[in-house]
Amino acid sequence: MPLRCLPLVLSMAALGCRAQTAPGLLPPPAGPAVVQTGVKLSPEMARRVEVMIRARSAVTPDYLISFSEPAKSEFPGYDQIIVTFTVSGNTSRPLPFLLSADGKTLVQFSKFDLSKDPRETVSGAGRPARGGPENAPVLIVGFDDLECPFCAEMNATLFPAVLNRYKDQVRVVYRDFPLDQHPWAMHAAVDANCVAAASAPGYWNYVDYVHAHAAEMTGDPKAPVKPEALLDKLALDEGARQHVSLQDLSACIQKQDDSKVKASVQEALSAPLNVGSAPVLYVNGEKIEGVVSVETLDRIIDQALIAVGQTPPPPSAPAPAATPAPAAAKPGN
């Protein structure tokens, strides 16, 4: 079993204890202290702990289990011990456990920091937005791939309905997350950002159109016009409709600077986000992976509104998905 799997097999459930905050941990029963801070566990106590861990986990007999000396913990009546697992010369990351002073209770649990507003988990700052203002009570941040069919489905079905119902109560922002397996997704993201730098409405028109017509950009090397050329033309056409500087927009498109897109991808891949696929939404910090139903998303938004003291609007009939303005660039034109 790979060492990286150890935190899973030695989870809260495995040891029968679940705690999220310090007040949930009850003091151990009164009794003589057999576990002392700074004093190595006795062979008998160490064996009890080891047998319990082996019984409640999937580690095989070839794993060596070692324990640190008990150290003072933040929970009265409990010391912390650090457990490590070694096999074939490889040692796991340290895993903390709590051991009661009377030696009768072993606890492994996850402690979560609730001091930070979940909405601050992921930022939508500096990105084009639609819906409500910056101080809208609900912020939805989506990690989007313009070549992803599931992202296109979400864009076409969920957000027209959400914006129709919640209006200014919800602010929607897309962050870039082009996947490596999609050959023109990075190019599309760069072009979209070039449009965004000049016009937020133009950005959303471009994003909506590309999502709606992604299937037409097959990437066939024998096609007379490559997807990248189609994407560039769409961006320039949208820039013309928005009356932006076509010289600046064209220069941005030709440069194809993907540094900001790559930075967005790296942030998404890293903790605490750990985004591994698209689409992924964050509704005031609550992570939603994949395409969900309108009813499910409505329920999550309603809960977010109630949490900030606002009353959700009554349900409304889903709005039809609108086809955005840009005209498709025809092969050969």
Image (tube, grey):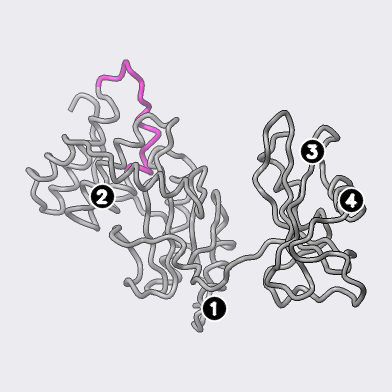
The amino acid at mark 2 is Ala
> What amino acid is labelled 4 in the image?
Pro
Task: Determine which residue is flagged by label 3.
Answer: 64
Residue 215 x/y as whole percent: 40, 33
Question: For the residues carrying marks 1 and 2, which lies nearer the camera in this image?
Answer: 1
Q: Position of residue 291 (x, y in %)?
A: 54, 50
What's the residue at 8%, 49% (across, down)? 245
Q: Give left or right: position of 88 versus 319.
A: right
**Residue labelled with disc 1:** 307
Label 2 with label 4: CB-CB less than 8 Å: no
Look at label 1 and name its amino acid.
Ala
Identified by mark 3, the residue type is: Leu
Q: Which residue is more in the foreground, 215 or 235?
A: 235
The span from disc 3 to disc 2 (Cα, nearest Å) is 64 Å
Left/right of residue 304 with respect to residue 43 in the rendered view: left
Task: Write down the region rendered in magenta.
Answer: 210-224
**Name of the residue lying farthest toward the front:** 39
Q: Say which label, 4 or 1, has the lower sequence index.
A: 4
Q: In this view, does 9 lie to the left or right of 147?
A: right
Q: In which quarter of the image is residue 183?
A: top left
Select label 4 or label 3 by which is in front. 4
Instruction: Residue 216: say if magenta.
Output: yes
Q: Tell me how far mark 4 sits from mark 1, CA to CA.
A: 51 Å
